[in-house]
Amino acid sequence: MAESLQLWRESLLEDYRVYLSRNRELSDNTVRAYLTDLNELLDFLFTSLATASGREPSVSQLVEWLSAPTQIRAWLSEMSRQRVARATLARRIASFRTFSAWAQTHGVIEVNPGVKLHAPRPENKLPTVLNPAQAAVLLDTARQHAFPESTPGLVDPEGLRDWALLEMLYATGLRVSELTGLRRADIDSAEHTVRVIGKGDKERVVPYGIPAQLALEQYLERGRPALVATPGPQSGGDWVFLGVKGGRLDTRVVRSMLHRLTALARVPDLGPHGLRHTAATHLLEGGADLRSVQEILGHASLATTQRYTHLSMEQLRRVYEQAHPRA
């Protein structure tokens, strides 16, 4: 890629990042997702232009294609061909519409192709959740890996961290970014609560139970000190959950770890958000009211929490069929 094109791209991404962070006040995760979407679009347009012309495209050509609805639809069609989830496709359309509106306002493009794009209707698909027995098997598997049988009396610092992470995810229903963003001062061990800064910088306090407390204590006493001592540019700090280099744990590491442990536990595969769904479903099945679950999960709208009532209907139907004489 020519230096002029690379400099233009870097400047565009940085200006857009500043706008998203300062003007729109979006979370770091949302900003990162929007920039990733824009990077993927730019890569697609660059490759398409180079293939069509047989040479490296110029800045003006790339800007022209950024303004062309047909090229944006080609990008979206390629994602559909790759069977990208409908929800992901909808998010990327929303992401591009935000960018194209900003780009037109700031003179990057003359025409805003985003106004002609419409997001696909969301799938009415219920998330994968574990039943209580499967959740118990998963957490027990994590605990066993924290205390490997091959080294009696010794612990695996990463294993202790992963065990505490899963116990806390399941106990609190936190978003994975909220959990990895916890600091030591956010945990009240005496009250068994964590203080969370969620979406929109809204603060809430979430309780957790004794199993999570035990796992957290083991990690903080025996696992975290070993990770803090790991030499690295970001070693230490007051983050609760640390990576192998001693800095804040990356959410991608959590996802990878959870997929690995679900396979070892031989339970349905799911990511951190699936464990959040599981926690919410089990709360409702245990008799918690919607408003309380809404507060725990940090949902702005009760309608979002109501999705989980559909999951609980399966248990309600089983109870009905077993108990009602005319079922």
Image (cartoon, helix red, strand yellow):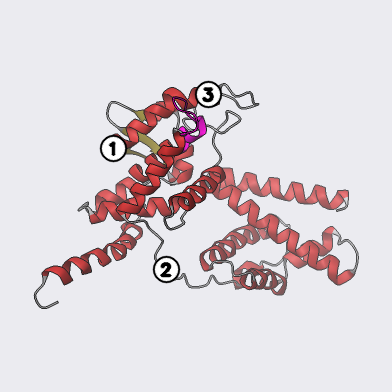
State whether residue 95 is above or below residue 175: below
Instruction: Identify the secondary structure beneath mark 1.
Output: loop
Q: Amino acid at mark 2?
A: Lys
Q: Residue at x 77, y 51 (%)?
A: 9
Q: Which residue is mark 1?
A: 209
The image position of residue 159, as x and y in percent, is 48, 35
Q: Earlier in the sequence, mark 3 or mark 2?
A: 2
User: In this orientation, does residue 25 appear?
Assistant: no
Q: Residue at x 56, y 62 (%)?
A: 94
Instruction: Identify the secondary structure beneath mark 3.
Output: helix
Q: Quadrant of the C terminus?
A: bottom left
Front one among 294 and 327: 327
Say if mark 2 contacts mark 1, CB within 8 Å.
no
The image position of residue 306, as x and y in percent, is 30, 61
Q: Which residue is mark 2?
A: 125
Q: CA distance from mark 3 to mark 2?
A: 42 Å
Q: Is residue 106 left or right of residue 187?
A: right
Instruction: Identify the secondary structure beneath mark 2.
Output: loop
Q: Is residue 237 left or right of residue 268?
A: right
Disc number lying in front (3 or 1):
3
> What range of the chain is rendered magenta?
149-162
How many C-alpha atoms fall within 10 Å of the one at disc 1: few (<14), some, or many (≥20)? Answer: some
The image position of residue 243, as x and y in percent, is 56, 33
